[in-house]
Amino acid sequence: MASGKGGVGKSTVAANLAVALAGLGYKVGLLDADIFGPSMPKMFRTEDARPYAESKDGRDMIVPVEQYGIKLLSIGFFVDPEQAVLWRGAMASNALKQLIADADWGELDYFVIDMPPGTSDIHLTLVQTLGITGAVIVSTPQEVALADARKGIDMFRNEKVNVPVLGLVENMAWFIPAELPENKYYLFGKEGCKRLAEELKVPLLGQIPIVQSICEGGDNGEPVALNLDTMTGMAFRELAQSVVIATDARNHQLPPTAAVSTAK
Ligand SMILES: Nc1ncnc2c1ncn2[C@@H]1O[C@H](COP(=O)(O)OP(=O)(O)OP(=O)(O)O)[C@@H](O)[C@H]1O
Ligand SMILES: [Mg+2]
């Protein structure tokens, strides 16, 4: 789950997508790769979790936290985010690699990674550590966000990186006031992601409206997708179904992604 621009709702969409996929019966792992600004401990009400290590086949493996049927790891469980901000790039990269390779994720159907904003060293570390099946790009329909979404897509499509883009998610697509439910306000512009998806020939995987409960669900640690039958839950259920279809299509058409070689 990536975007170019910050604050467009990657973490919110990643958390709810993971919960919706689990609600559809898939085994889901969620990695908060935003080393300098982890969101998942709060969004999953697991701020106090301190994952421990267990010996497995002679190796010490971190046991992911389990919440809402999802296996979860975040640097926020191990380090005070204020301290992590002072880390050098190599420290952050190493910490992230440990959360991937030294954790007992078990067998998963989907491994959702919430990326930091932009195109950073952390992104490079991720594509070097894992063969990423596909990128889901989150944007608001606003022009400045779309311009950054393009940069994010270019990074994944770069011939050296070569991570297929599964599609776009339009977040904050519109607002419907409770007292005027027949009115739809396009606060950030109308269908900007739909147009970008058409232009780049990638699917528009979902449109998520601006809803107070989505924001509150993040703050309370109870993602709205825990209830897939509400209006907002339904938007994430549809997103999850589209992601499943796009992933299956990608796996049919293309070989597994290779991790980017670090050889000089
Ligand atoms: N569809 C939505 N409706 C209402 N509020 C939303 C919606 N999507 C996101 N938000 C709110 O917008 C803010 C930013 O969202 P979030 O933290 O998910 O963005 P982000 O892209 O992960 O940010 P960052 O780039 O800092 O990692 C949060 O307060 C979140 O609760
Ligand atoms: Mg985030």
Image (spheres, rainbow, N blue to C red):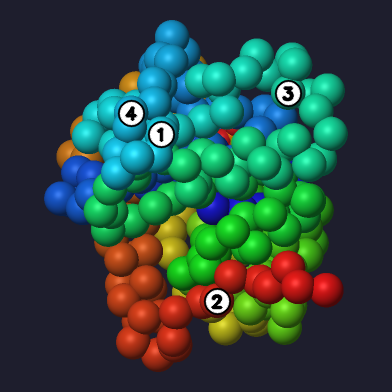
How much space separates mark 3 and mark 1, taking CA atoms? 23 Å
- Is 69 placed above or below 117 here? above
- Is 59 placed above or below 39 here? below
Dot 4 or dot 1: first in sequence order is 4
| Numbered mark located on residue 84 in the image | 3
| Numbered mark located on residue 60 in the image | 1
Q: Residue at x 21, y 53 (%)?
A: 26
Q: Give the residue number, with chain letter if any, for mark 2.
A: 258
Q: Amino acid at mark 4?
A: Glu
Dot 4 or dot 2: first in sequence order is 4
**Location of residue 202 by image quarter:** bottom right
How much space separates mark 3 and mark 4, taking CA atoms? 24 Å
Q: Which mark is in front, 3 or 1?
A: 1
Give whichever of 126, 55 is nearer the camera. 55
**Does residue 139 appear in this view?**
no
**Location of residue 78 by image quarter:** top right
Dot 3 or dot 1: first in sequence order is 1
The quadrant of the image that shows the C terminus is bottom right
The answer to the question of whether label 4 and label 1 lie on touching residues, with beta carbons closer than 8 A, is yes
**Image location of residue 124, percent across then percent down:** 72, 58
Q: How many numbered circles are shown?
A: 4
Q: Amino acid at mark 3?
A: Ala
Q: Which secondary structure, mark 4?
A: strand
Dot 2 or dot 1: first in sequence order is 1
The answer to the question of whether label 2 and label 1 lie on touching residues, with beta carbons closer than 8 A, is no
**Image location of residue 234, percent across then percent down:** 27, 46
Give whichever of 192, 224 is nearer the camera. 224
